[in-house]
Image (cartoon, rainbow, N blue to C red):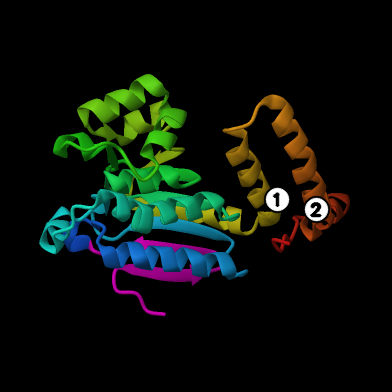
Amino acid sequence: MDYETILYTLDEGVLAITLNRPDVLNAFNRKMTSEIQDALKKAERDTSVRCIVFTGAGRAFSSGEDLKARTAEGNSDFGSTLRDRYNPIVLKMRNIEKPVLGSINGVAAGAGCSLALACDMRIASEKARFIEVFVRVGLVPDSGSSFFLPRLVGLGKALEMAFLGDEVGAGEALRLGLVNRVVPPEELESATREIALRLAKGPTKAIGLAKRAMNRALHMDLEQILDYEVYAQETAGASSDHQEGLAAFAEKRPPNFAGR
């Protein structure tokens, strides 16, 4: 289907979901969050999608909730906004057993920052900035920021970002572990593409199982995760990709993984 607020582009197993409201710095309105939810459901069902990339059109990744649209709608129900619009996106991003890569081209603020944090990996332009902007309007971090941020940067820095609302530039984000790589703006698309293709051509069944195991490990003790790793490894060991990996190793050739 055609979308109004996002671009959905699939090429060589890489699905690019581009937030496409550049005139308002890709701020989220009701239509955009609905379309992102639909795109993720579609991507989960489509076996030809082996990797998902989130990025923004124009000079921003996303400035967060479109407060002007929200005010115009007269919407003051934060609970339903989060439960119906944002939380399903974050949960799907974390539970989908395909790698999700954030290509952070500019400012990621508020819920836009949360969306970036929900990705499995983040590649940032030198122009990227991360801002937990909620405190500036008397609100608290939402859409998963309270979960992801302290796990990525530690509690002290997470609280600093939440309490002060100061921006974190790309260089500091890299030092903190908030992003995986930083590249010049003109290299962001090609650098993202290179990693996305590696993921898409990899053993995506095993990658999905690894993602599931690490998500669970955030809530398990060592004994529990050791038991779960047994299950995950047995599942991966029964996959076609494992057999292909063994054959490629024996034949001294690159593997041709199919994601099964």
Stretch in magenta: 1-21
Q: Of the residues under marks 1 and 2, which one precedes in the sequence?
A: 1
Q: Residue 68 in magenta?
A: no
Considering every residue shown, the one lying at the far right of the view is 250
Note whether 213 is above or below 13 in the view shown: above
Q: Which residue is mark 1?
A: 206
Quadrant where the N terminus is found in the figure: bottom left
Residue at point 51%, 70% (across, down):
42
Q: Residue 51 appears at what percent x and percent y?
A: 55, 58
Task: Determine which residue is flagged by label 2.
Answer: 242
Q: Is residue 55 visible?
A: no
Residue located at (79% from left, 50% from top): 235
For the residues bearing labels 1 and 2, Cβ distance under 8 angstroms: yes
Residue 74, quarter of the rendered image: bottom left
Q: Is residue 5 magenta?
A: yes
Q: Amino acid at mark 1?
A: Ala
Who's the residue at 27% across and 52% down the image?
62
